[in-house]
Image (cartoon, grey):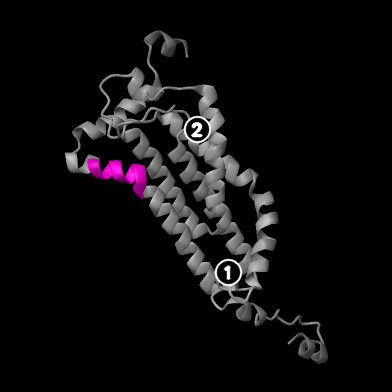
């Protein structure tokens, strides 16, 4: 650590220049693509991924459909809540954008005047991805990949330090996991109530309330024939 301090080297800034330096060497059209992807594209992709997962859960149905949909509803709520938690953090740290203190960066997005730590984009995408992973492992892995790509894009674009992204990942993960039990305790009864609704029930399962009534628990091996008939 003493040698690092004497040399004046900062791994965070070094990595910033290394990743952002790729933008200088890339074709102009590729930078424009990365600008759109990092600013809007990956956020839209995350929304579509959650909707795709919801469509699959809704179509599959099953006895746990309400709890599965509740877990998916938590994904966008966790993302929004994590960004709100970040508001006082950014105001307390007051870290300027990297291009304010460091020269020679290739900044792909202009007009960024807010503080840098932590990255809202990284926070939002990771919170949604972690909540989605809790709900569905397959879709969650895709979401985690999108979140990691979002973090890379923010540094590539020259608007965040790598530690801004890491901090956003940590904040998003913490909010999604720590508040998940409370969220599920509140959202699952709500989804079950919606499932019983003749019209809104289709939001939970493809057949709506009618399909929910047809889900019959499997007979236990120790049940008598009369008990199985009554259960049916």
Q: For mark 2, give the secondary structure.
A: helix
In the shown orientation, is residue 220 left or right of residue 75?
right
Which residue shows up at 53% across the image and 32% down it?
87
- Quarter of the picture containing the C terminus is bottom right
Q: Where residue 31 appears, x then y in whole percent? A: 23, 39
- Say above or below: 86 vs 14: below
- Say above or below: 3 vs 195: above
- Say above or below: 155 vs 228: above
Q: Where residue 128 appears, x then y in whole percent? A: 51, 49
Magenta-colored span: 32-41
Pointer 2 with pointer 1, Cβ within 8 A: no
Q: Main secondary structure of the magenta part?
A: helix
Residue 167, label in figure: 2
* Residue 107 image-quadrant placement: top left
Q: Going by the picture, which residue comes out furthest to the front?
A: 199
Residue 204, label in figure: 1
Which residue shows up at 48% across the image and 58% down it?
50
**In magenta segment, residue 40:** yes
* Residue 160 image-quadrant placement: top left
In front of the other: 104 or 222: 104
Q: Where residue 64 appears, x then y in whole percent? A: 64, 68
* Residue 24 image-quadrant placement: top left
Q: For mark 1, give the secondary structure.
A: loop
Question: Mark 2, mark 1: which one is toward the viewer?
Answer: 1
How many residues crowd mark 2 within 10 Å: few (<14), some (14–19), many (20+)? some
Q: Where residue 54 appears, x then y in whole percent? A: 51, 64
């Amino acid at each position: 650590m003493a040698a690092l301090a004497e040399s004046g080297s900062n791994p965070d800034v070094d990595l910033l220049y290394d990743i952002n330096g790729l933008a200088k060497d890339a074709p102009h059209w590729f930078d424009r693509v990365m600008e759109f992807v990092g600013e809007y594209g990956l956020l839209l992709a995350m929304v579509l991924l959650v909707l795709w997962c919801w469509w699959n859960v809704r179509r599959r149905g099953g006895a746990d459909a309400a709890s599965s949909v509740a877990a998916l509803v938590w994904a966008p709520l966790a993302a929004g809540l994590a960004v709100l938690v970040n508001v006082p953090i950014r105001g307390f740290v007051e870290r300027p954008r990297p291009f304010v203190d460091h020269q020679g960066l290739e900044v792909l997005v202009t007009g960024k005047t807010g503080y840098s730590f932590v990255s809202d984009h990284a926070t939002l995408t990771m919170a949604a991805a972690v909540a989605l992973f809790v709900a569905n492992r397959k879709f969650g892995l895709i979401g985690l990949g999108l979140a990691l790509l979002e973090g890379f894009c923010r540094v590539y674009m020259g608007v965040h330090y790598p530690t801004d992204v890491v901090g956003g990942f940590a904040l998003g993960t913490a909010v999604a996991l720590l508040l998940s039990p409370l969220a599920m305790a509140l959202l699952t009864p709500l989804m079950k109530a919606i499932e019983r609704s003749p019209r809104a029930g289709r939001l939970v399962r493809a057949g709506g309330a009618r399909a929910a009534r047809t889900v019959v628990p499997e007979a236990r091996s120790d049940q008598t024939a009369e008990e199985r008939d009554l259960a049916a």
